[in-house]
């Protein structure tokens, strides 16, 4: 699997766009016309659903761009820019989610490898080493009585 290339610049852009959406209380509609706010998009929406949303936004952008440019209004241009920003936001959220999934998988694998390494080191100890470790633990547990 290829490494996800989600940089600090991508994260900064995601934060900027998400904050803008948060303060304007905008929503993005799903295929079923269910409105999703920024919190739902980031925290509860699956990558598959986000890809469907991105595809829908791309089709809406293409439809607006294919209109006659001489008859398009300022409102159409504003809507087009808004759709492009929403598509970019959804794409960045997808990248962010994939980046987090990759980091979680790497952390799990690292923990497994560290456990195997510890087990291997423990199996290589001689009985004398184990005896010394146990004696050291016992001496640390000695308590003073009054």
Image: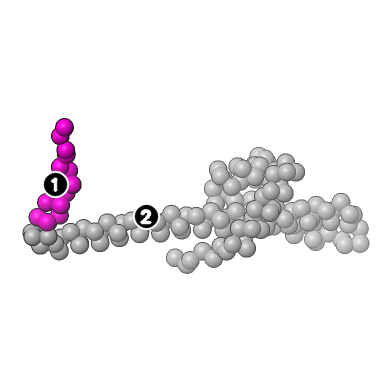
Residue found at the far top of this picture: 146
Q: Nearer the viewer, residue 103 or 27?
A: 103
Report the residue marked by disc 1: 138
Magenta stretch, main secondary structure, is helix
Estimate the x, y position of residue 114 in percent, counting from the top left: 30, 59
Tell whether 26 sits left or right of 67. Answer: left
Q: Position of residue 67 (x, y in %)?
A: 83, 59
Q: CA distance from mark 1 to mark 2?
A: 34 Å
Question: Which stretch appears magenta?
Answer: 130-146
* Closer to the eye: label 1 or 2: 1
Q: Nearer the viewer, residue 63 or 101?
A: 101
Quarter of the image with the N terminus is bottom left
Label 1: which secondary element = helix
Q: Is residue 93 above or below residue 144?
A: below
Examine the rendered structure and indicate whether residue 43 appears above or below residue 146. Answer: below
User: In this view of the protein, can residue 99 be seen by the observer?
Assistant: yes
Give the mark nearer the N terminus: 1 vs 2.
2
Q: Residue at x 80, y 61 (%)?
A: 66
Residue 36, percent across and down? 65, 42
Residue 76 spot, x, y in % from top left: 84, 53
Query: Is 145 one of the magenta-colored residues?
Result: yes
- What is the number of the mark on residue 108? 2
Q: Residue at x 66, y 58 (%)?
A: 13
Q: Residues within 10 Å of mark 1 (few under 14, many from 20)?
A: few
Above/below status of 146 relative to 63: above
Q: Which mark is residue 32?
A: none
Q: Quadrant of residue 126?
A: bottom left
Q: Quadrant of residue 95?
A: bottom right
Q: Residue at x 87, y 62 (%)?
A: 69
């Amino acid at each position: 699997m290829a490494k996800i290339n989600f940089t600090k610049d991508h994260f900064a852009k995601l934060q900027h766009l998400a904050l803008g959406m948060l303060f304007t209380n905008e929503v993005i509609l799903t295929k079923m016309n269910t409105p999703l706010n920024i919190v739902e998009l980031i925290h509860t929406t699956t990558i598959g659903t986000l890809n469907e949303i991105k595809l829908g936004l791309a089709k809406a952008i293409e439809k607006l761009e294919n209109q006659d440019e001489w008859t398009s209004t300022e409102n159409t241009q504003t809507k087009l820019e808004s759709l492009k920003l929403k598509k970019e936001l959804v794409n960045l959220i997808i990248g962010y989610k994939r980046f987090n999934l990759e980091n979680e998988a790497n952390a799990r694998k690292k923990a497994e490898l560290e456990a195997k390494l510890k087990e291997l080191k423990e199996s290589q100890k001689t009985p004398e080493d184990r005896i010394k470790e146990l004696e050291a633990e016992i001496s640390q547990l000695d308590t003073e009585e009054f």
